[in-house]
Amino acid sequence: MAESAASAVDYLAHYFDPFLDLFAENDELARAYFRTLTRGQPENAALRGLRTLTEDNLTAAMVKAGIPDPRARHGAQVMFTSYLGELMLLAAGSTDRQQTATGIRRTAEFVTVYEEDGRCPSLSSRLPSGQS
C-alpha cells in the first residue's frame, strides 16, 4: 500500500474515534444518536449537514491519496454507512469499542484499494485474463 493510501486508511479509520469514544461510554446516547440519524426526517437538517460534512471530509482524504473523485465520493458514502452499522452493533451491545474500530478500519482499507486502471486488485488477480 502506498504511503498516501496508508495515511488515508489511518485518517478514515480514526475519523469516527471521538464519536465511538463518547458512545462507548454511554449506551443510551449511542442508541438515541443512531435512531435520530436513521430517521432521515426533513427536520434533521443538522444531522444531514453532519453527514454531508463527514462525507466531504472523507472524500477529500481519499482524493488526496490519489483516488479519483467519483470513486472517493462512493467510498465516503460506504464509510459513513459502515460507521452507522458499526454504531448500531455497538449501541446494541453486540460489539465493544475495539471491535467497532476494527470494523471501521477494515472498511477504510477496502474503500482505499485502487489501481490506476480502475480495477480492483483483489478481484483482478483472481479473474482469468481479459475479465477484469
Image (spheres, rainbow, N blue to C red):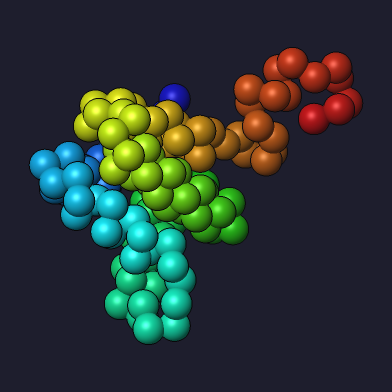
Residue 77 screen position, x and y as percent: 50, 55
Residue placed most toward the observer, 73 or 65: 73
Q: Up-down: is 19 above or below 39?
A: above
Answer left or right for 16 relative to 58: left
Residue 43 screen position, x and y as percent: 37, 83
Residue 47 screen position, x and y as percent: 33, 71
Q: Up-down: is 65 above or below 129?
A: below
Q: Up-down: is 72 above or below 4?
A: below
Residue placed most toward the observer, 5 or 111: 111
Residue that appears at 38% across and 31% down: 103
**Is the C terminus in the top left, top right, bottom left or bottom right quadrant?**
top right
Residue that appears at 85% across and 17% down: 128
Residue that appears at 45% across and 77% down: 41
**Is the N terminus in the top left, top right, bottom left or bottom right quadrant?**
top left
Residue 119 lies in quadrant:
top right
Answer left or right for 51 relative to 25: right
Residue 131 visible within the image: yes
Residue 72 visible within the image: no
Residue that appears at 65% across and 32% down: 120
| Residue that protrudes farthest toward the bottom in the picture | 43
Residue 86 lies in quadrant:
top left
